[in-house]
Amino acid sequence: MNEFSSKLLESAVNQLSRLPGIGKKTALRLALHIIREDEDFANGLGTSLMKMKEEIVFCDKCHNISDAALCEICSNPKRDENTLCVVEDVRDVMAIENTAQFNGLYHVLGGIINPIEGIGPNDLFIRELVERINREEIREIILALPATVEGDTTNFYIYKLVQHFEIKMTTIARGVAIGDELEYTDEITLGRSILNRTPFEQIMKR
């Protein structure tokens, strides 16, 4: 016997449960909450999701999510254009911005090198990073990738590509356990790690 008394409810639960971290029980709770809300809420939720899917773009410059060709960070004249923070994905941009300790620009790689999962340098925005260094007056690159084997491999690959440029390369000073990701690090710890960043050459000598 089907556990759902409504095919419409079952369909909604099945769709919601496809979201990461959302199991069938949580999906059911969300669906029942939507049913209890007024029609304006459901319409607003549906409209917001459709507009996000159809209209959101990636910044032409840094590959962060954006509503326009250039994101609000890249188009802000008050940002330090000489400092570039390299991160894995857009969640890391959000985490660092929440610290209010960084005023430079970002470059989102869209992932990290992971041969096991079939992700190589050509699958990431690494070539675009080198092009930015050639084109823009970048004086420092901050490597803010995960403290994992894959993150370290990506750091080293980028370092080898850009070491001939007259540019300072640093990495954030991690006060978190190996393998922890930026989005799960508390804002105070992450903020301090950005302020107390370490020259990448020192990391290479360890």
Image (cartoon, helix red, strand yellow):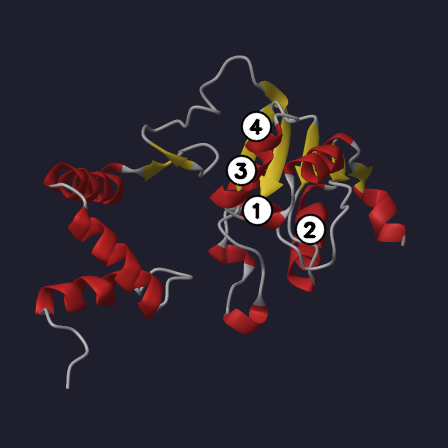
Disc 2 vs disc 1: which is toward the camera? 1
> Going by the image, does 150 lie left or right of 60?
right
Q: Is residue 120 above or below residue 111?
A: below
Q: Is residue 106 above or below residue 177?
A: above
Towards the viewer: 177 or 83? 177
Task: Tell me whether the residue at label 4 lies in contact with that at label 2, contact meaning CB atoms closer than 8 angstroms.
Answer: no
Label 2 vs label 1: CA separation? 18 Å
Disc 3 vs disc 2: which is toward the camera? 3
Q: Position of residue 58 (x, y in %)?
A: 37, 38
Towards the viewer: 44 or 85? 44
Label 4 vs label 2: CA separation? 18 Å
Secondary structure of the residue carrying numbered label 4: strand
Q: Residue at x 58, y 60 (%)?
A: 113
Q: Which residue is mark 4?
A: 105
Query: Mark 3 or mark 2: which comes first in sequence?
Result: 3
Label 3 vs label 2: CA separation? 17 Å
Disc 4 vs disc 1: which is toward the camera? 1
Query: Mark 3 or mark 1: which comes first in sequence?
Result: 3
Mark 4: amino acid: Leu
Query: Mark 2 or mark 1: which comes first in sequence?
Result: 2
Q: In the rendered view of the protein, which quadrant contains the C terminus?
A: bottom right
Label 4 vs label 1: CA separation? 18 Å
Q: Residue at x 51, y 64 (%)?
A: 119
Q: Which mark is residue 183?
A: 1
Query: Mark 4 or mark 2: which comes first in sequence?
Result: 4
Crowdedness of circle 4 by 10 Å Cα count: few (<14), some, many (20+)? many
Towards the viewer: 47 or 155? 47
Label 3 vs label 4: CA separation? 10 Å
Q: Which residue is mark 2?
A: 155
- Quadrant location of residue 201? top right
Q: Which residue is mark 3?
A: 93
